[in-house]
Image: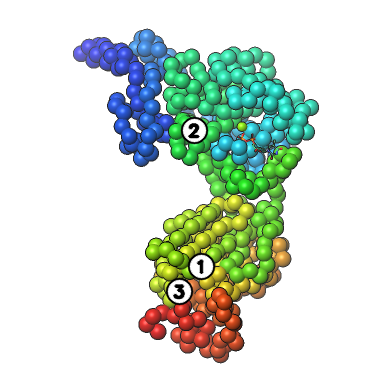
């Protein structure tokens, strides 16, 4: 009975192996028997391509290989702390969680031209200079091109071992000789190919099989491997997505093409936190590490212009101050535009809805633009308050105080909710010369006794809107002599006095 089932399984495997062609989504790796326009798995269009998906293990081995036995271990065995190797670049180490772990495989993804090759040339050179065997394999550029870059970076003298190769088998054989390399950079995984599968280089099947072979090599030898992966917006070229679940860490290198700031973000990390960022600046001499990002993000601030607010945020373990810029302008379109760079568009919609519903701020006749300066991408809800302040400031044409930082989460009811790590945010603001913080009422307690800054706590968005509106003058108009300061804040009287007519609720 058992043997007949086993033989039918073998038969089935052989039968399946014969139909080697299938349609594989080049974005997520899902396979289909027939071509279809849309991938059901990831929802992308036109990403299916015909591929030979014969597995990397030959059929004969699959069906006949007898499993070897291995020892099973207990959970409480002796373990060594993951030995880490510093890359020599503080910002890179911060993102990896303290250096490269032996035998680990990292994927560094990013748009073409963002600076991945530059970053990794610098990292391998630092490792090589520190006396480790560091290898840089480029499948995209000729040796001469890589040398030229190294020269430009002033790293030509670093004893990096360099090759321009694309065959995974050749690479593995070459690197198996001599001392085990401590760091191997494969630039990029999309250019690699292995004999074990028949698909063309760059296809999902090839990328996956090549990555598998390299991961096996890393685990066996203890070498740390960095795979470079291009991300394309239209998903036409095999994205490194399919590799993401196979590797130990995924780092994403981001930045606006027009700006020189680059942010290395950890998306997945089996050996460290995933919310850390490393900040770099692309200069004529390669990437420079930015140890104090706040200074950088605030360096081009236009003091005293309406529509800008400084947000005291937290990225990973460190506070980062960044400027939010808003522009609210009357629209000529039936459906006004809402555009946002560096922040979650759905959070912007939420803040706008709360402003309309609870604070009487009418924005349906206005285009709204929001931008996070410096190319940073903010994920914290704590930025709500700064965004709201910037939006209202732009609408009423009133600059916010230049020495103030803002943080706090806005709830749907218009209440300002507390956020984590208030002391760290305040400390950073103080360090950079800010004089006051606008923060949630309930965060006052967390701030500690003497924060060194004036603390303006707000518990309601309406209060903040009234305060900003009291400073404002509608575009093209003149500032009215200040509102009735005697009326208690947040009351209808205060709102009526402080809020320009177009701000008031229709009902009031
Ligand atoms: P590169 O590392 O080749 O990008 P990727 O490997 O991600 O495709 O870097 C590309 C850009 O960086 C290129 O437009 C030139 C610029 N660059 C500098 O500005 N300064 C430098 O020192 C170097 C090496 C590159
Ligand atoms: Mg490159």
Which residue corresponds to the image point at 54% horizontal and 27% vertical from the top-left? Answer: 189
Front one among 195 and 245: 195
Q: Quadrant of residue 427?
A: bottom right
Which residue corresponds to the image point at 48% horizontal and 57% vertical from the top-left? Answer: 339
Q: Which residue is mark 2?
A: 240
Quick one: label 2 or label 1, which is nearer the N terminus? 2
**Residue 23 x, y percent position in the rendering:** 35, 26
Q: Nearer the viewer, mark 2 or mark 3?
A: 3
Quadrant in which the N terminus appears: top left
Q: Count numbered badges in the picture.
A: 3
Asked if residue 345 shows in the view, the reply is yes
Q: Which residue is mark 1?
A: 329
Disc 2 secondary structure class: loop
**Residue 447 x, y percent position in the rendering:** 61, 67
Quick one: label 2 or label 3, which is nearer the N terminus? 2
Q: Which residue is mark 3?
A: 361
> Is 22 drawn above or below residue 274 in the view shown?
above
In space, the residues marked 2 and 3 are separated at their CA atoms by: 44 Å
> Is 479 drawn above or below residue 161 in the view shown?
below
**Residue 499 x, y percent position in the rendering:** 50, 81
Asked if residue 6 shows in the view, the reply is no
**Residue 217 x, y percent position in the rendering:** 55, 21
Are there few (<14), some (14-19), or many (20+) residues within 10 Å of tag 3?
Answer: many
* Label 3–label 1 contact, CB within 8 A: no
């Amino acid at each position: 009975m058992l043997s007949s089932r086993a033989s039918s399984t073998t038969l089935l495997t052989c039968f399946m192996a014969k139909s080697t062609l299938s349609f594989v989504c080049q974005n997520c790796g899902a396979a289909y028997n027939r071509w279809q326009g849309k991938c059901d798995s990831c929802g992308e269009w036109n990403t299916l391509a015909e591929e030979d998906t014969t597995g990397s293990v030959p059929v004969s081995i699959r069906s006949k290989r007898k499993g070897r036995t291995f020892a099973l271990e207990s959970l409480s065995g002796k373990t060594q702390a993951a030995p880490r190797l510093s890359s020599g670049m503080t910002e890179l180490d911060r993102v990896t969680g303290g250096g490269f772990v032996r035998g680990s495989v990292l994927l560094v993804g990013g748009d073409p031209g963002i600076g991945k090759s530059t970053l990794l040339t610098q990292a391998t050179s630092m490792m090589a200079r520190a006396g480790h065997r560091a290898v840089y394999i480029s499948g995209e550029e000729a040796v001469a091109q890589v040398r030229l870059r190294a020269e430009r970076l002033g790293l030509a003298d670093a004893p990096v071992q360099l090759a321009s190769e694309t065959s995974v088998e050749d690479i593995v054989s070459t690197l198996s000789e001599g001392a085990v390399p401590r760091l191997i950079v494969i630039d990029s995984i999309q250019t690699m190919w292995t004999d074990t599968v028949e698909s063309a280089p760059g296809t999902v099947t090839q990328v996956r099989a090549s990555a598998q072979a390299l991961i096996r090599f890393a685990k066996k030898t203890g070498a740390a491997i960095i795979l470079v992966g291009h991300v394309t917006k239209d998903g036409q070229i095999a994205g490194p997505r399919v590799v993401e679940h196979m590797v130990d860490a995924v780092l994403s290198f981001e930045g606006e093409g027009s700006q020189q700031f680059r942010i290395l973000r950890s998306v997945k990390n089996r050996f460290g936190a995933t919310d850390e960022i490393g900040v770099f600046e692309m200069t004529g001499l390669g990437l420079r590490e930015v140890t104090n990002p706040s200074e950088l993000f605030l360096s081009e601030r236009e003091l005293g212009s309406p529509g800008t607010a400084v947000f005291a945020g937290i990225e990973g373990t460190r506070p980062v101050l960044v400027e939010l810029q808003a522009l609210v302008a009357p629209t000529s379109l039936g459906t006004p535009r809402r555009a946002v760079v560096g922040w979650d568009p759905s959070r912007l919609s939420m803040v706008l809805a709360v402003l309309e519903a609870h604070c009487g701020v009418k924005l349906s006749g206005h285009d709204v633009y929001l931008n996070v300066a410096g190319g940073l991408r903010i994920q914290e809800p704590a930025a709500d308050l700064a965004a709201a302040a910037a939006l209202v400031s732009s609408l009423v044409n009133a600059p916010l105080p230049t020495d103030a930082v803002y943080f706090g989460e806005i709830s749907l009811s218009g209440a300002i909710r507390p956020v984590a790590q208030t002391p760290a945010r305040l400390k950073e603001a103080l360090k950079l010369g800010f004089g006051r913080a606008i923060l949630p009422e309930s965060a006052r307690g967390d701030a500690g006794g003497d924060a060194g800054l004036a603390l303006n706590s707000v518990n309601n968005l309406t209060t903040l809107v009234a305060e900003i509106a009291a400073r404002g003058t509608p575009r093209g108009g003149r500032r009215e002599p200040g509102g009735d300061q005697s009326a208690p804040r947040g009351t209808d009287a205060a709102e009526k006095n402080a809020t320009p007519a177009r701000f008031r609720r229709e009902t009031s």
